[in-house]
Amino acid sequence: MKNKKSIINIVLVEPEIPPNTGNIGRLCVGLNISLFLVGKLGFSLKNKYLKRAGLDYWDHLKYYRYKSLNELRKEFSNSRFFYFSKKAFNVYYSANFKKGDFLIFGKETEGLPEKLLEKNKDFTYRIPMRGETRSLNLSNSVAIVAYEAFRQINWERK
């Protein structure tokens, strides 16, 4: 089912907070991109807070469920996967994004697994911060990176 792929693809691995996923779903609708939800979710997809954050856009969202990241990677084995973590060395704007890329974000409390990051360190990026904050909100992080990917791909509204 390769037709699931869009200009860029957002992947959330085990998201825990319904409003974050709702906001990201709304962003995906606004950009006409796909959202992939991977692993155990910390909420039901019928959650009222998820729906409230996504407003009435949730019904327009192209989203897909996968049991594991390995399952997703196997289905899209010819695609590129970028991982985002505060633990990465590379900064997100140094990545060279192309159409069809998958942008992968971890759960709010733990991020992505260390082994996964180490195994993919050349494709692991961070959003730099100078203040005392430990991390950014997940939906903000996804928006920052998604719009940078669009900028690089030269996407234009038609």
Image (tube, grey):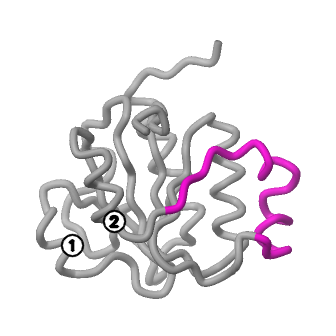
Name the residue carrying label 2: 69
Q: Secondary structure at mark 1?
A: helix
Q: Residue 116, labelled with which disc? A: 1
Q: Mark 1 belongs to which amino acid?
A: Leu
Magenta highlight range: 46-65
The residue at 26%/40% (across/down) is 79
The residue at 25%/44% (across/down) is 80
Corner quadrant of residue 115: bottom left
Q: Residue 149: image x %, image y %? A: 41, 38
Q: Residue 71: image x %, image y %? A: 32, 61
2 or 1: mark nearer the eye? 2
State yes or no: residue 59 in magenta. yes
> Contact (CB < 8 A) between labels 2 and 1?
yes
Q: How far, Cα to Cα, is label 2 from label 1?
A: 10 Å
Corner quadrant of residue 68: bottom left
Residue projecting furthest to the bottom: 109
Which tag, 2 or 1, sits closer to the chain's start? 2
Residue projecting furthest to the front: 1
Corner quadrant of residue 152: top left
Q: Mark 2 belongs to which amino acid?
A: Leu
Quarter of the image with the C terminus is top right
State yes or no: residue 50 in magenta. yes
